[in-house]
Amino acid sequence: MTSISPIRLAMNLCSVVPCLADTKITASDVNRFGTMVSDSDFDRLSCFEPARERFRRTAMTAVYAIDLNRPLYYFMAGEFNSEPGWRHNRFIHDNDFEVIIPIQGHFELAVEDDRGERTVRISPGNCTVLPPRTKGVGAARTGEHVNFFWMHFVATSWRPGVITTQKGELIRPSRSGAAQVDVAESDEELDATQSGTIQASDVHSGDTSLKPTENEDFTSLIATTIDHISRNDYCPDANNLCLLPERFRIDDINRILLPLKNLLACANSYRYSQKENDYLTAVVLIELCDSWLRSLTAAHQEHTANTPGKTVPIVEWIRAYMSAQLTVASVAEHFQMNPDYLSRLFKQEQGVNLRDYLISLRVETAKVLLIRTDFSLARITRYSYFNDERNFIKQFKKATGLTPTNYRKQFAQTHLNNGAIDPTIPIPQELRRVIEGLYM
């Protein structure tokens, strides 16, 4: 922990947290950001009320990033029903996560983990994720019928992090850090755990501390992923991850219950291999992650639609005047803006920085030409506004995970009956007329 002056703290809050509920903010709230300040010093911040208010309206949520390239192990799962008056038994998680998906009734858990003690409310429509090394007990007896699904699993590689949101909308990261947690420390340990039924205590655990200064900020990662989802595009940065916040709303519960019930059916019947349970566990987790990311995407799209923004005319101008020579500097010059300011503004309003937006337009153009024409790569490079073929192949593979040639082989047949081209993709007009004419 580092000491920080009240004035410096106010300046940091103004610049870092752009804008929680109207609750009294205390020194302990600020200390969660990795600073140390006394209550008396914090009271002196009254002259910086805008910073205090913006801090209150900002929510930080714990998120767990699970590596899908490393083994996931099913531990146990089930469906629980109870009459009114039930209270959750005391529990202790070792190295296992628990996912709770309530269907009916509410109850509260008093839990304790590396972040301290807190009360977690379990309510229908929301998914709750309890990380390893969590212990707890029912906070009170229920006054209604309770029905929920639960699932325990062990992830051999995961890392804790945070995201920063305002009213469900992601905002720019407030800090960055890294904490890689590899529960299994060697390939030999992984091989040993693969033989027979896994027990949560069998896996060697690393440092799963969730101290704020050790958390990784996933806001940028998730913002980039949302941008890809908005375009129904491949998500290279999140493809091998399952991102789960500690609590989130499930919009389509049936989509989650289908694979979860399939998992329960398999787990409760004989299978010669445990791997089926492990794979089905991964499917449930991916569906949960997808549900959360889609809800964030929908919130972002609604916010964008209701907020005109200063960059809307810039986006329209770029699409109209796209060229190989178009750069951040040339766009800034046309609109008489500082390039650094334009990049920050564009990222704030559009969710992606201007340089990446220009590349994404070029890649989208190349996709259309790859699946709608038999043009050579050299010709597609030119028509999709890249300066050279080598850079085109590099940027295309980074964005899609495939080389242009492999993309053409994999997707060309799926678009043969669809003649219309997305008008937001800056295909040269003479080419657009030719390509769409082929499908008339």
Image: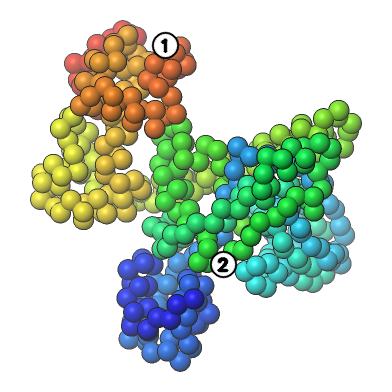
Q: Is residue 37 left or right of residue 282?
A: left
Q: Is residue 276 visible?
A: yes
Residue that badge 2 annotates? 211
Say the numbered circle drawn on residue 170: none
Say the numbered circle drawn on residue 416: 1
The image shows residue 63, relative to residue 358, as above or below, that is below
Q: Residue at x 50, y 66 (%)?
A: 213
Q: Position of residue 320 (x, y in %)?
A: 18, 32
The image shows residue 417, relative to residue 189, as above or below, that is above
Q: Position of residue 203 (x, y in %)?
A: 75, 50
- CA separation in Å, label 1 and label 2: 53 Å
Q: Is residue 303 left or right of residue 384?
A: right
Q: Residue at x 34, y 20 (%)?
A: 368
Q: Is residue 74 left or right of residue 424?
A: right
Q: Amino acid at mark 1?
A: Leu
Q: Residue at x 46, y 36 (%)?
A: 236
Q: Is residue 50 visible?
A: no
The image shows residue 372, relative to residue 260, as above or below, that is above
Name the secondary structure under disc 1: loop
Q: Quadrant of the C terminus?
A: top left
Q: Position of residue 142 (x, y in %)?
A: 81, 66
Q: Residue at x 10, y 44 (%)?
A: 334
